[in-house]
């Protein structure tokens, strides 16, 4: 009987499998570039987050009109404007990533983004309702069972602008207390309206599309760089950036007939993109309202999972994609779209019990504002009063969606809403972020300590600097790859069998304790200060439990990581750096190491004075060029290389044939902690050196290709 491995595939089955493998090989480089594209706007977030958090703390603790207030407001707005324009930043970064950083493509992407949103603005309009005054109802209170009490009114006047207003015959009813309105044949069949008889979120929406009769929920409309259009999060920007890149790659060298030759080359690219985004605008207009509502439903449903389970599932998926560099693609919808939650949805779907709890907590947290806003308002209408104030006066806060976007919006407007307020509405902001602090601050550093203690005592002193540096980097900035990739490529089972489950448990506890500490991209100590300590002490954005429970999670994860990795490395016989007795464990290049000792690459002494400095510099440059040349050779030569790129810590390459790549040869050159080959996609982990290797490889490849012509 033949074994499974000996069975020969025939016909269409074999062909289908080969096509599937080829398709996966082609998709990986594309997704890898997309993930790399996300790093450009993400890299902006740390400094923007610092300005946002510090500015909010200063402004909230200063008297209006004072220098401190204006300084805090200035810093706050400088940070807030970056987060408020993430879609266009993603649009530009995607265009750059797929065109080898072309400035023309970046400008073209902005043009396309403006055109698409302009079209949407033209296709969206508010529907003026013809109110049948005999069907007008108003909510006056909430009964003892938590149900709305509706009264029927018929007297209506129309103002000079043609908008209806209630003409209150009963002078005992205070107009300011009436915040809920409805039209319908009975109180059991009502559609919500505001005081100008325009539909609001809930049973209907003010926005309609000229393309079809269906209403678009108000939460899916926002201002994109000053244009009122669909709230697509970062998705539309990504699509437009991809279209701009495609147009650039195809048309930037096109030569038109002499009569219109002025528009040839790069001038043609924005013109083609202008036209190319038109179908995309129509597609989004037809599809996005349903996609957006689906994402909102997902965000609502996932937020109702018990005991931090949503955070646990998130981290299992996110950490599993880290080795492939695709985790940025995965968390984008959860961080920056309503798949990660929505403030408007939280208000609209709040139960009577949640509404009452929210009013109680909000009034205590914002006592001065509550005294002004809720003075004389009946108990049953206070929630609607607060809701309408936020939706009308703070639309950007109201329409913010996505776990990270909401966190930054709340920090920017902490005097209006805070994390504890929204927790009462079932919105656990930070559920897809806070868990990282648990293993960044102490977990992975303790894993590094455990690996170091597995090194023989006689070698520990020599390698201590490497482990300490990697652990401290992880603690301070949240950059994990020096540690993660050390054990990932030595023993992948350590990553998937020990690290990933522990990281998911860290997220589970963070979600369970409702720790609302946000972050930029890392979850290190700097992020904790900016998004945990400063918001708590500076503006009371969250409770002490939320701000400091994450330290408890981190303390719990420290021994779990230490003992987990210590025994796994020891009894799994994992040859971590230094354990095999090898002395060549430094991460710097040979040329840099020699130069730091005052020696040339060949071991000769560098002469004193300016010449020595120049010699050292030349030696380092020569070594880098040689290394880049050898990498090209180990990748199968110039003819096998399609594209050279880099991200924060990896050299990302696309080749024609992955089987020609000599992985061991690349690692032998030094500096790399591992290499990953998936079809035609190759990633080499350097930790930072890739930024020096990439431009030299591109230059060498250009020279080699020119020499062949």
Image (tube, rainbow, N blue to C red):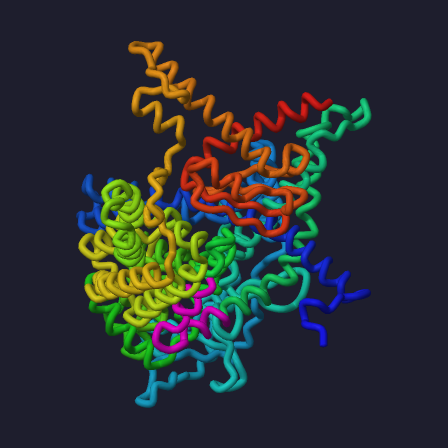
Q: Is residue 637 left or right of residue 8?
A: left
> Can the viewer see residue 404?
yes
Above-or-below relation of 631 to 564: above
Stretch in magenta = 297-317
Q: Where is residue 612 in the image (x, y as percent from the top left)?
A: 34, 13
- Which quadrant of the view contains residue 165? bottom left
- Which quadrant of the view contains residue 558? bottom left
- Which quadrant of the view contains residue 508? bottom left
- Helix, strand or loop: magenta stretch: helix
> Can the viewer see residue 159?
no
Q: Position of residue 661 (x, y in %)?
A: 60, 42
Q: Position of residue 561 (x, y in %)?
A: 29, 62
Which residue is rendered at x = 68% and y = 71% of the image? 4
Q: Which of 572 and 418 is in front in this view?
A: 572
Above-or-below relation of 504 to 595: below
Q: Position of residue 689 (x, y in %)?
A: 43, 35
Q: In this view, does 83 lie to the left or right of 443?
A: right
Q: Nearer the viewer, residue 558 or 2?
A: 2
Above-or-below relation of 460 to 348: above
Which residue is rendered at x = 35% and y = 54% of the image? 408
| Residue 311 on the magenta span | yes
Q: Which of 608 and 211 is in front in this view?
A: 608
| Residue 377 on the magenta span | no
Picture quarter with the N terminus? bottom right
Which residue is rendered at x = 51% and y = 68% of the image? 199
Q: Is residue 184 left or right of residue 597?
A: right
Which residue is rendered at x = 71% and y = 37% of the image? 250
């Amino acid at each position: 009987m033949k074994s499974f491995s000996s069975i020969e595939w025939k016909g269409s089955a074999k062909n289908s499998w080969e096509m599937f493998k080829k398709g996966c090989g082609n998709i990986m480089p594309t997704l890898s570039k997309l993930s790399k594209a996300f790093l450009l706007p993400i890299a902006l977030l740390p400094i923007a987050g610092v300005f946002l958090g510090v500015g909010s703390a200063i402004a909230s603790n200063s008297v209006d009109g004072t220098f401190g207030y204006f300084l805090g407001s200035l810093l706050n707005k400088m940070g807030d404007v970056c987060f408020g324009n993430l879609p266009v930043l993603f649009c530009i970064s995607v265009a750059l990533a797929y065109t080898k950083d072309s400035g023309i493509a970046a400008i073209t992407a902005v043009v396309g983004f403006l055109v698409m949103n302009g079209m949407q603005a033209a296709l969206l309009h508010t529907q003026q309702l013809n109110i049948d005054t005999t069907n007008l109802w108003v909510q006056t209170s909430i009964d003892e069972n938590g149900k709305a009490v509706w009264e029927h009114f018929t007297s209506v006047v129309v103002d000079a602008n043609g908008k209806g207003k209630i003409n209150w015959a009963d002078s005992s009813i205070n107009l300011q207390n009436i915040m809920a309105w409805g039209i319908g044949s009975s109180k059991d069949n009502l559609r919500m309206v505001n005081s100008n008889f325009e539909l609001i979120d809930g049973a209907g929406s003010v926005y309609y599309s000229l393309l079809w009769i269906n209403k678009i929920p108000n939460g899916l409309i926002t201002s994109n760089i000053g244009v009122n259009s669909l709230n697509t999060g970062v998705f539309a920007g990504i699509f437009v950036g991809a279209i701009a890149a495609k147009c650039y790659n195809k048309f930037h060298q096109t030569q038109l007939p002499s009569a219109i030759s002025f528009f040839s080359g790069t001038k043609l690219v924005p013109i083609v993109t202008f036209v190319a985004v038109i179908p995309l605008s129509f597609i989004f207009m037809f599809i996005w309202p349903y996609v957006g509502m689906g994402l909102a439903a997902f965000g609502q449903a996932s937020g109702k999972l018990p005991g931090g389970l949503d955070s646990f599932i998130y981290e299992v998926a996110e950490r599993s994609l880290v080795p492939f560099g695709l985790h940025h693609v995965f968390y984008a919808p959860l961080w920056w779209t309503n798949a990660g939650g929505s403030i408007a949805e939280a208000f609209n779907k709040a139960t009577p019990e949640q509404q009452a709890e929210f009013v109680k907590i909000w009034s205590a947290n914002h006592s001065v504002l509550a005294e002004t806003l809720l003075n004389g308002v009946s108990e049953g209408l206070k929630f609607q009063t607060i809701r309408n104030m936020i939706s009308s006066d703070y639309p950007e806060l109201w329409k913010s969606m996505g776990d990270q976007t909401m966190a930054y919006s709340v920090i920017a407007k902490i005097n209006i809403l805070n994390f504890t307020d929204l927790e009462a509405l079932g919105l656990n902001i930070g559920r897809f972020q806070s868990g990282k602090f648990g293993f960044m601050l102490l977990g992975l550093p303790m894993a590094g300590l455990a690996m170091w203690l597995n090194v023989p005592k006689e070698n520990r002193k020599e390698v201590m600097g490497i482990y300490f540096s990697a652990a401290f980097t992880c603690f301070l900035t949240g950059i994990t790859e020096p540690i993660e990739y050390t054990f990932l490529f030595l023993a992948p089972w350590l990553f998937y069998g020990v690290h990933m489950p522990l990281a998911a448990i860290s997220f589970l506890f963070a979600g369970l304790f409702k720790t609302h500490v946000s972050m930029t991209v890392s979850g290190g100590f700097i992020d904790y200060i900016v998004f945990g300590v400063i918001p708590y002490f500076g503006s009371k954005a969250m409770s002490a439990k939320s701000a400091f429970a994450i330290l408890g999670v981190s303390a719990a994860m420290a021994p779990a990581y230490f003992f987990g990795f210590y025994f796994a490395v020891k009894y799994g016989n994992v040859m971590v750096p230094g354990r095999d007795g090898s002395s060549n464990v430094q991460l710097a290049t040979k040329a840099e190491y020699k130069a730091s000792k005052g020696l040339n690459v060949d071991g000769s002494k560098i002469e004193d004075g300016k010449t020595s400095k120049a010699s050292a510099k030349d030696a380092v440059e020569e070594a880098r060029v040689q290394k880049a040349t050898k990498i090209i050779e180990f990748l199968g030569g110039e003819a096998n290389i399609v594209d050279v790129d880099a991200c924060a810590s990896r050299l990302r390459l696309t080749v024609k044939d992955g089987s020609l790549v000599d992985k061991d040869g690349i690692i032998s050159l030094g500096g790399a902690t591992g290499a990953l080959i998936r079809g035609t996609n190759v990633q080499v982990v350097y930790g930072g050196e890739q930024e020096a290797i990439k431009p030299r490889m591109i230059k060498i490849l250009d020279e080699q290709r020119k020499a062949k012509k």
